Image (cartoon, grey):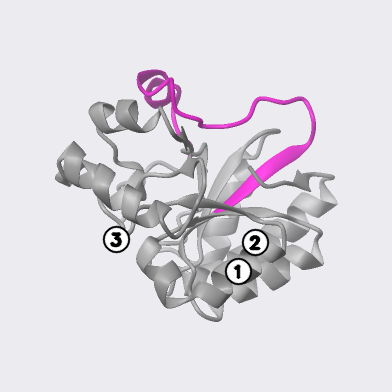
């Protein structure tokens, strides 16, 4: 499957320089983010593992999934995690008009009040980003675990992350059914590694 970049390159960050790719800092802090939830059992499993390491995460939620799982959404907030908008129906911005895209994000915002937004697939037109910047901090990433890729295993996802970790890194995992076979291996190992190396895991 590998048609994606594990480490976001400088030229991509330069082209979309008004989006947030990482959080520059000298402190040993990283930001674990989770896309596509809330998903029954999987999101709650993620929360349990984060709690074991006194870690907080940022969950970019699909509005449709929040509507179907309001109790998990409530648990996320009560546990102190950050939540963000990931559109209502996981839309690819490149394939939708700016008008339709913004309307779908607004539908999600009715359920997920947040100033954080992440575009599904990382695909967003400049016109869409410009319109959203008025109301949202658009959060991208500098490390993809690749847990959505069924052609690799959880050990490879873990190595994808730890190879590129730097202070202020924003890291992407997915609390989804698709990613689950790899997430359940990669996340515990990554949390152990970060704790061992003295990193704090904070919410955006």
- Find disc 1 in the rendering and name its residue: 74
Residue 8 included in the magenta stretch of the image:
yes
Report which residue position mark 3 lands on: 89
Q: Are marks 2 and 1 in contact (CB under 8 Å)?
A: yes
Left or right side of 106 for 114: right
Report the residue at 47% width, 66% height from top: 37
Describe residue 66's horizontal placement relative to residue 127 as left or right. right
Q: Position of residue 42 (x, y in %)?
A: 54, 75
- Residue with the mark numbered 2: 77
Q: Secondary structure at mark 1?
A: helix
Rendered view: 99 above or below 76: above
Nearer to us: label 2 or label 3:
2
For the C terminus, give its image quadrant.
Answer: top right
Horizontal and vertical percent position of residue 136: 45, 35
Q: CA distance from mark 1 to mark 3?
A: 20 Å
Residue at point 50% right, 39% down? 141
Left or right: 126 as drawn, with respect to 83: left
């Amino acid at each position: 499957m590998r048609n994606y970049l594990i480490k976001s390159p400088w030229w991509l960050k330069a082209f979309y320089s008004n989006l947030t790719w990482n959080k520059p800092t000298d402190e040993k802090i990283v930001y674990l983010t989770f896309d596509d939830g809330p998903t029954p059992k999987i999101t709650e499993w993620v929360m349990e593992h984060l709690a074991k390491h006194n870690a907080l995460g940022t969950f970019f939620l699909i509005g449709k999934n929040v509507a179907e799982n309001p109790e998990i959404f409530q648990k996320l907030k009560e546990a102190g995690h950050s939540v963000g908008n990931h559109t209502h129906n996981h839309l690819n911005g490149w394939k939708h008009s700016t008008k339709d895209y913004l309307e779908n994000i607004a539908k999600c915002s009715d359920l997920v009040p947040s100033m954080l937004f992440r575009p599904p697939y990382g695909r967003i037109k400049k016109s869409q980003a410009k319109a959203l910047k008025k109301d949202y901090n658009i959060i991208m990433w500098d490390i993809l675990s690749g847990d959505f890729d069924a052609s690799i295993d959880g050990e490879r996802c873990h190595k994808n992350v730890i190879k590129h970790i730097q202070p202020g890194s924003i890291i992407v995992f997915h609390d989804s059914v698709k990613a689950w076979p790899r997430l359940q291996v990669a996340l515990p190992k990554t949390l152990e590694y970060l704790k061992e190396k003295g990193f704090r895991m904070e919410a955006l």
